[in-house]
Image (spheres, rainbow, N blue to C red):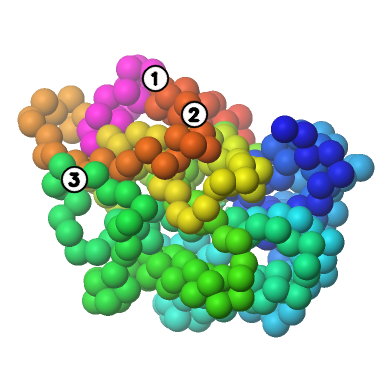
Amino acid sequence: MSGEEKVVCVTGASGYIASWLVKLLLERGFRVKASVRDPDDPRKTEHLLSLEGAKERLHLLRADLLEEGAFDALVEGCEGVFHTASPTTLSANDPQAELIEPAVKGTLNVLRSCVKVPSVKRVVITSSIASILNNGKPLNSDEIADETWFSDPVYCEENKLWYILSKTLAEEAAWKFAKENGIDLVTIHPGVVIGPLLQPTLNLSSEMFINLIKGGAKAFPFPVCRIVDIRDVAFTHIQALEVPSASGRYCLVGHVVHIYEALKILKELYPALSLPEECEDEKPLLPKHQVSKEKAKSLVVNFTSLEVSFRDTIESLKEKGFIDI
Ligand SMILES: NC(=O)c1ccc[n+]([C@@H]2O[C@H](COP(=O)([O-])OP(=O)(O)OC[C@H]3O[C@@H](n4cnc5c(N)ncnc54)[C@H](OP(=O)(O)O)[C@@H]3O)[C@@H](O)[C@H]2O)c1
C-alpha cells in the first residue's frame, strides 16, 4: 500500500527503532513529521535528513516528552501517530524522574495532543514485551506468553525493574486514556530488537548485543533472549497503522533462544569471534517461555531469521566502528 499524500508523525525519531520507521515510511511515500529532542545536534538528525525522500517529505520538529503541549504542532494534520519516544536505560539513579515520569507523562502528553486533532485516525505506541512478561511467573517454564498477559507493577517495583516498570505503567496509562477519550490505539510489544543501525550512536539493545559477543552469557542480562529484527519491527508499526482491523496489543518476538544457543549461532557465523568457553557447553537447557506469534502473524508474515539478524547486526556494528572482528 502506498502512503502517498498521507501525513503521519513519529516521536523520538532519532532513536534506533524510530529511524528505521521513518526510513520505511519515506520509502512508502508518506509525508513524515518527526520529533527530536535536539534538532541542532547533527548526531540526532543527519542520518534522518540523508534518507531517501527526506528532502521532500521529512519535517523535523523539536519536542520533549515532559513539556506540556510540546507535541501539538507535531500531531497537527496527521492521520497516524507513532509514539516511540521513551527513556531506554536499565540503570537510573532516580528511576521516577529518569524513567517513569518521561515514559508515563510523555505518553499522556502525546495522547492529549492527539485528542485535540480530528485528523488523527489511529495511534501506534511502541511498548515492549517487558510490559507483558513480568508478572512473577517463572520464565523458565514452557508456557506460551501472549497478549492477554500483563506485567505486574508491584512485582516490577519490588524487584527494582525500573525500565520494565516505566513501560508497564506507560502502557497502562495509554490504554486508560485511549478508552476514556475514544482513541483508536494499537500497542506493539517487541522483544530485544537487533539488526543494522541507522543512527551513529549506540542504543541500549545494540549495546546489549555488543556485550553478548564480547562477554558471553554472563554479560547479557537474561538467560533467554526474545529477539526480533529491527526491520520487522518498523514494518509491523506501519502495518499496525495501515491494516484497518489491527487493534489492541501485539507481541512481537521472532525468536526465543537460550543465550547459549545464540552464542553457538554467532560462533558458527563468525568463527573468529573469541567467545568465552561457555558457548561450547552441551548441558541440557531449561525449558523456556515461548511468546505467541499468532496475533502478530496478521501484521507480519515472515520474521527475519536469527542468522540474518545476527550477521546484519555485526556487519553494521563493524561498519560503524563499534566492534572489530
Ligand atoms: N530496542 C529494543 O530492544 C526495544 C524493545 C522493546 C521496546 N522498545 C521501545 O522502543 C522505543 C524506542 O527504543 P529504541 O530502542 O529505539 O531506543 P533509543 O534509540 O534510545 O530511542 C529512544 C528515543 O526516545 C527519545 N527520548 C527519550 N527521552 C525523551 C524525552 N524526555 N523527550 C523526548 N524524547 C525522548 C530519545 O531521544 P534522544 O535521541 O534525544 O535521546 C530517542 O529518540 C522505546 O519506547 C523503547 O522502550 C525498544
The residue to which callout 2 is attached is 301
Q: Earlier in the sequence, mark 2 or mark 3?
A: 3
Q: Where is residue 271? Give x, y as percent.
A: 35, 17
In the image, what residue type sits under mark 3? Glu
Where is residue 244 shown, x and y percent of the image? 62, 46
Mark 1 or mark 3: name the one nearer the start of the chain: 3
Decide which of 237, 166 is in the foreground and name it: 237
Horizontal relation, residue 95 to residue 316: left or right: left
Q: Is 201 situated left or right of 314 in this image?
A: right
Sequence-wise, the earlier of marks 1 and 2 is 1
The residue that mark 3 highlights is 143
Look at label 1 and name its amino acid: Tyr
Q: Quadrant of ligand 1?
A: bottom right
Residue 212 is situated, as x and y percent measured from the top left of the image, at 35, 40
Q: Nearer the viewer, residue 184 or 265?
A: 184
Magenta region includes residue 260: yes
* Numbered range of the magenta stretch: 258-275
Is residue 240 part of the magenta span, yes or no?
no
Going by the image, does 132 lie left or right of 45? left
Instruction: Give the residue pinned by disc 1.
Output: 270
**Residue 142 percent location from the top left of the image:** 15, 42
Which image quadrant for residue 93? bottom left
Q: Give the amino acid at mark 2.
A: Val
**What residue lies at 82% left-to-right and 66% top-to-bottom?**
76
At x 12%, y 35%, the residue is 285
